[in-house]
Image (cartoon, grey):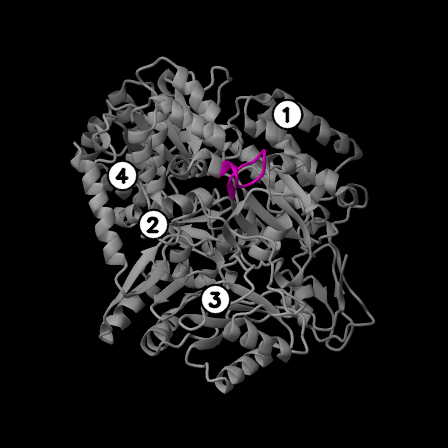
């Protein structure tokens, strides 16, 4: 490739930019794994068919990757000239047809289908966009009745805009999604204003002052949600077609690569990484520049860059999403990393189970090779770098650096002692850098905009942003990217929507199987490597799992121990035997069969695992156990001393009995019992045979008279 | 370990083994290829791989037995993987496992007599917003309930999968 390689890249940028600025309507349909499982392929097909069937011109239907709104999928965004860009969620085949007929053909937004993309900047006090693109979206609340309801707000807004003859320019719509405010209903005025509305006066003020006169409202402040997303890693996720290199290129893909190869030396790039302060995003939190610098200094013709996409932490799905949504960012980052350390070979080690991500990566590599962005003499720079994919085999411990290397080399993926570290002697004994997907996805932006820009975001010890995978008992699960330093409480409330069914947040598990729990009182902890470690947990890979009062800490501890016992490679006795023995003790506790001696044994075993294990799996297995037992000591003691499970989850510790003063003999409980443990005549008090009872809870669910007592 | 008559290694597979055997990391590449081709690693093929790569058969089985993705026996035509990630566990995936065992009359890691279904508990699928989730031959089903299971199995039997 000669100079024409760079020219070809620039001409793609110019051409596609022109094509995409044409005034057409764009409909983008989310097409990540969660979207597809929720039915987005059918939705996309419906859009294409309806548009064709109705002869509608100048509409493009595209797929995009993951928007991070996993529990609202399938999501569809419609961008039309003259009306605000709208995001619809949980779209069905019927919903797609409504969007085509109402939104696209009649230019009227569809009620009860709009979803919120949380964390938009809402500090603006006046609505600057009225006149061309204004929509008022009203969100009802899940709980709590207000004197002035969402329906009242909708009626009054609709009536007032008609009175003021604004109804053609200002559309009023009710959202599908429900929020959790108590002081009023969220009203978003697209694109970037938000207020909490709780009276007719507020409605009049918003229309009169903020929208028409473009003035601040004296009595109503804009809603400050306390946190906003900042998308660096996810900058293109949900915006570009992950199967089109041209779409990636027009969204700044490979700008960083050109800057690195043609305007910087490898040492300058490493220096930029040092200034950025980027720390590993896979869980270790190690300074990226140090690893790169170590590898750079090794005198070897052969060096390797490995992208670790083995994402084994249960509850973490950010790496899958990044690769499914923006595969070119990883390729670009690996070329830059290779240039910086002097490596010509790249391997992307990715879970075999991630079929869609693998497919998109394979395509992206092919496309990059065709355009001279990978291979010999990249873009005429003189730098050669090749990349291939290596599939993982389903073992968690192969996510550990030395286990990963063993696996790629065709051996059992068992970790080995360090030193030597992989940066000195790694794959086939050559200097090797292993970086997590998210770590790499930051590189093009850092090289493009500078390390100083990156370090101005976040906190002093944890610069930049963090992608968090939210799951568990939340109202809304998905992916968010926030500046480091954002309080965890705000992440749970604003992005997670709080706990489902109005329940209390008991704790938040962070850092996966190597982490711990942060209790409700401590949720103000900032998202930060050091701050979270100080609270007895860790940030890790950014998995955030919320638990409520129905979750038992013994049961949760058992889950993590079962995981560790299954995944232990077996090399170190303290991990191999320790994890199994701890699991056995916790199974006994859950069955009400533990002995007082076993209380002390738990902590001795934890200490032994920490001291005697070679790798992070063994040394960090005790972390969630110690965290759970110390934060919830009374619940732990209730199980051991009182043989009682306060969360009613450990079946052997639950007793169901019938309250004679409440039972009317309707026989519902007897009929629901799968083992015929309940007896009694019609209209006579029933009784449960405790010997036969399997504590499944079906009678408790079936009784309409509160006559079943659960202890 | 697998029992029964030794399978013949097909010409196509022999050619693929020969194609990859001199590449770095050949064993892993080849085992993935065999797993894709047969849906498990037949003993005859494992022996052939060891022969072609010039490594002891124990080394090949060392890697196979370390890796949940590589199977020692043929799964059912519809292989059901129930996710055991944290979010799925908290959403009572254990009940889904119990229900499947009851409906199919087999335990986890078993195969039905007619060879149609097998059940496995698998590592986190990374679809936590769809908990409890399961996958059948790679297709993900989310927010699965006991009542939906009968329909899902019927769809598989009906040949839509």
Q: Which mark is residue A365?
A: 4
Observer-side mark, 4 or 1, equals 4
Residue at point 41%, 52% (across, down): A66
C-alpha gap between disc 4 and disc 3: 43 Å
Observer-side mark, 1 or 3, equals 3
Relative depth, front residue between B42 and A470: A470
> Label 2: which residue?
B77
C-alpha gap between disc 2 and disc 1: 43 Å
Span of residues in magenta: A454-466
C-alpha gap between disc 1 and disc 3: 58 Å
| Residue A150 in view in this figure | no
Please say whether residue A457 is one of the residues in the magenta stretch: yes
Looking at the image, tell me whether mark 1 or mark 3 is earlier in sequence order.
3
Q: Are marks 2 and 1 on the same chain?
A: no
Observer-side mark, 2 or 3, equals 3
> Label 1: which residue?
A610
Which residue is at the far top? A299
Looking at the image, tell me whether mark 4 or mark 1 is earlier in sequence order.
4
Q: Label 3's element?
A: loop
Determine which quarter of the picture holds residue A75.
bottom left
**Looking at the image, is A677 positioned above or below residue A285?**
below
């Amino acid at each position: 490739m000669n100079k024409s390689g760079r020219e070809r890249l620039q001409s793609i940028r110019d051409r596609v930019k022109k094509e995409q600025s044409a005034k057409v309507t764009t409909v983008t349909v989310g097409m990540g794994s969660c979207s597809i499982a929720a039915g987005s392929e059918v939705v996309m097909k419906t859009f294409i068919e309806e548009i064709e069937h109705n002869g509608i011109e100048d509409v493009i239907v595209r797929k995009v990757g993951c928007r991070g709104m996993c529990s609202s999928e399938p999501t569809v965004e419609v961008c039309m000239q003259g009306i605000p860009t709208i995001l619809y969620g949980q779209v069905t085949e019927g919903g797609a047809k409504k969007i085509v007929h109402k939104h696209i053909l009649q230019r009227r937004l569809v009620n009860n289908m709009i979803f919120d993309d949380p964390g938009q900047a809402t500090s603006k006090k006046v609505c600057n966009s009225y006149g061309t693109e204004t929509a008022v979206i009203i969100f009802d609340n899940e709980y709590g009745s207000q004197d002035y309801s969402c329906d009242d707000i909708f009626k009054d807004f609709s009536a007032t805009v008609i009175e003021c003859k604004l109804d053609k320019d200002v559309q009023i719509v009710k959202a599908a999604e429900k929020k959790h405010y108590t002081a009023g209903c969220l009203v978003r005025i697209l694109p970037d204003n938000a207020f909490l509305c709780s009276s007719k006066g507020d409605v009049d003020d918003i229309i009169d002052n903020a929208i028409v006169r473009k003035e601040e409202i004296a009595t109503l402040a804009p809603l400050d949600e306390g946190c906003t997303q900042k998308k660096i890693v996810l900058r293109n996720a949900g915006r570009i077609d992950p199967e089109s290199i041209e779409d990636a290129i027009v969204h700044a893909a490979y700008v960083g690569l050109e800057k690195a190869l043609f305007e910087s030396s490898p040492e300058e790039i490493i220096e930029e990484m040092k200034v950025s302060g980027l720390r590993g995003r896979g869980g270790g939190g190690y300074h990226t520049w140090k690893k790169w610098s170590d590898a750079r200094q090794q005198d070897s013709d052969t060096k390797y860059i490995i992208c670790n996409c083995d994402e084994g932490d249960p509850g973490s799905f950010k790496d899958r999403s990044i690769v499914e949504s923006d595969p070119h960012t990883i390729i670009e980052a690996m070329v830059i990393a290779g240039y910086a350390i002097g490596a010509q070979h790249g391997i992307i080690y990715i879970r075999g189970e991630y079929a869609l991500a693998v497919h998109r990566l394979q395509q992206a590599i092919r496309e990059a090779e065709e355009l001279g962005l990978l291979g010999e003499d990249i873009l005429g720079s003189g730098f050669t770098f090749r990349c291939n994919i290596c599939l993982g085999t389903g073992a968690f411990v192969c996510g550990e650096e030395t286990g990963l290397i063993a696996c790629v080399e065709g051996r059992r993926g068992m970790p080995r002692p360090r030193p030597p570290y992989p940066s000195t002697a790694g794959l086939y004994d050559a200097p090797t850098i292993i970086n997590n997907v998210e770590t790499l996805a930051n590189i093009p932006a850092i090289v493009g905009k500078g390390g100083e820009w990156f370090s101005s975001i976040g906190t002093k010890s944890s610069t930049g942003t963090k992608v968090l995978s939210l799951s568990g008992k939340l109202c809304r699960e998905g992916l968010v990217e926030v500046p480091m330093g954002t309080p965890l409480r705000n992440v749970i409330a604003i992005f997670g929507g709080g706990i489902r069914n109005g329940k209390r947040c008991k704790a938040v598990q962070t850092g996966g199987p190597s982490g711990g729990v942060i209790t409700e009182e401590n949720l103000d902890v900032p998202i930060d490597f050091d701050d979270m470690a100080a609270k007895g947990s860790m940030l890790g890979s950014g998995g955030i799992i919320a638990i409520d009062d129905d979750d038992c800490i013994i049961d949760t501890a058992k889950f993590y121990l079962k995981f560790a016992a299954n995944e232990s490679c077996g090399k170190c006795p303290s991990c191999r035997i320790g994890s199994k023995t701890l699991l056995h003790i916790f199974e006994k506790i859950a069955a009400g069969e533990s002995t007082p001696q076993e209380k002390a044994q738990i902590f001795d075993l934890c200490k032994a695992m920490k001291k005697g294990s070679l790798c992070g799996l063994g040394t960090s297995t005790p972390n969630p156990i110690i965290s759970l037992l110390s934060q919830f000591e009374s619940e732990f003691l209730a199980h051991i001393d009182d043989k009682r499970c306060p969360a009613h989850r450990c079946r052997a510790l639950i007793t169901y009995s019938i309250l004679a003063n409440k039972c009317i003999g309707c026989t519902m409980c007897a009929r629901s019992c799968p083992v015929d443990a309940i007896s009694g005549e019609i209209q006579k008090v029933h009784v449960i045979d405790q010997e036969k009872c399997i504590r499944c809870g079906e009678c408790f669910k079936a009784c309409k008279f509160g006559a079943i007592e659960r202890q | 370990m697998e029992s029964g008559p030794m399978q013949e290694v097909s010409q196509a597979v022999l050619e693929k083994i020969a194609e990859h055997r001199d590449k770095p990391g050949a064993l892993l590449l080849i085992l993935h290829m065999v797993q894709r081709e047969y849906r498990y690693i037949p003993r005859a093929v494992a022996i052939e791989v060891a022969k072609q790569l010039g490594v002891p058969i124990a080394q090949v089985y060392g890697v196979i037995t370390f890796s949940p993705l590589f199977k020692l026996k043929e799964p059912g035509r519809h292989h059901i993987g129930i996710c055991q990630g944290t979010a799925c566990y908290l959403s009572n995936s254990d009940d889904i496992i119990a229900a499947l065992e009851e409906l199919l009359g087999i335990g986890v890691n078993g195969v039905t007599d007619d060879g149609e279904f097998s059940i496995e508990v698998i590592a986190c699928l990374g679809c936590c917003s769809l908990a409890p989730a399961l996958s059948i031959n790679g297709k993900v089903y989310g927010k699965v309930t006991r009542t939906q299971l009968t329909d899902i199995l019927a769809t598989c039997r009906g040949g839509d999968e």
